[in-house]
Amino acid sequence: MSEAVNENPQFDAEIDTQYDVAHWSLRETPIPTCVEILNTGSDNFRTAHGNLVQNVRYGDGPKQSMDIVRKPGVSDDAPIMVFVHGGYWILTGRDMYLHIAQPAVTRGWMGVIVGYDQAPDVTVTTIVNEIRDAYIFLSKRFPKCPNLTFIGHSAGGHLISMLLATDWESYCPTQYKDLVPITKSVPISGVMDLGPFVHISYNKDLQLTKKEIVDLSPALHIDKAVKNIKKFGTKIIAVVGENDPPKFCEQSRDYIEALKKSSVDAKYIEYPVLDHFEVMEKLDEPDYDLLKHIFDNEN
């Protein structure tokens, strides 16, 4: 950690601990364990169902591609679940998360796993714009999609929340009217305020600017989010684990409370015992309660 501290002159050890996902987990080695679970799950899914996977590019960046997973016969007007991975905008990659498409595919939906370029090769601003472009790409490719649900974990939760904090008329003036409405947005342990991340060790790679903190913090753009949520008819479900860092829980809880003040359909769910990774790792388990909230219209 000392090397990372020296490389980030704004480092604050207390804030770093507050957002250290491994520190708050009850598991002995949560990060290596999570990586093993994800890699094993995706390898097994790829072995069993690789024929269902189509990799397509949505931009020119090295990692700007997505895996579209669907059973034969599933038409272009099927519902779509999109997953955007985390890793503090730096770590992991699309390939590790392929099996998370399983619950969507089982239900006759399409499952889409989105990759994106990462810091320090690109800025967080670029990453946010890539996820915006992925959304535009899906809207063009599947214009008749009746249910477009975005799920994002950690940094991915931040990225999907920025979709709702976007002034689409300014971002894509000739395309915004054709965007497929986002039916549900499910940030799991999402980052809603970038301010504290200037002070953690990862900022040596992120190099967040004051402008980015203001422009790219969903918590600072509630009015834009409410406008898009009401336009799209989006339901927001912010999810955390009991053993997430308390600051992650606080950010999600505050975000939902701010949205609810504007009378939008927003829910906060905290799962007992689960840590920052487990709340996402269980997405391919058929009996996982969160899947009811994601796929069932009644919840």
Image (cartoon, rainbow, N blue to C red):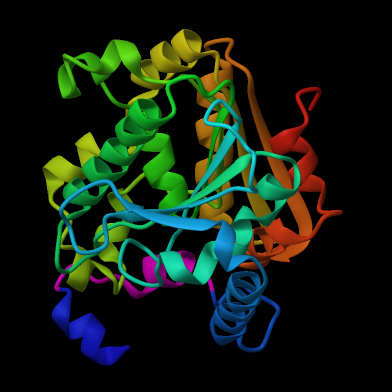
Q: How many marks?
A: 0
Farthest residue, direction right = 287
Answer left or right for 146 relative to 90.
right
Q: Quadrant of the C terminus?
A: top right
Image: 105 above or below 201: above
Q: Is residue 261 visible?
A: yes
Residue at 53% of width from left, 35% of height from top? 254
Q: Residue 37 magenta-drawn?
A: no
The residue drawn where x is 14% and y is 73% is 9
Is residue 13 found inside the magenta-colored segment of the image? yes
The magenta-colored residue range is 9-21
- Asked which quadrant contains residue 261, the reply is top right
Where is residue 204? Give x, y as percent: 19, 72
Q: Looking at the image, is 217 positioned above or below residue 241? A: above
292 with respect to 175 (left or right): right
Quadrant where the image shows the N terminus: bottom left
Q: Is residue 245 visible?
A: no
Q: What is the x, y in percent for residue 120?
A: 17, 69
Tell me where residue 213 appears, x and y as whole percent.
22, 44
Task: Establish if 127 lies above or below 294.
Answer: below
For this view, does 101 lie left or right of residue 26? left
Image x and y of residue 263, in percent? 58, 10
Residue under the image location 67 percent in, 71 percent down: 48
Q: Who's the residue at 21% across and 35% down the image?
A: 215
Please state which of residues 95 and 20 is positioned toward the viewer in this rendering: 95
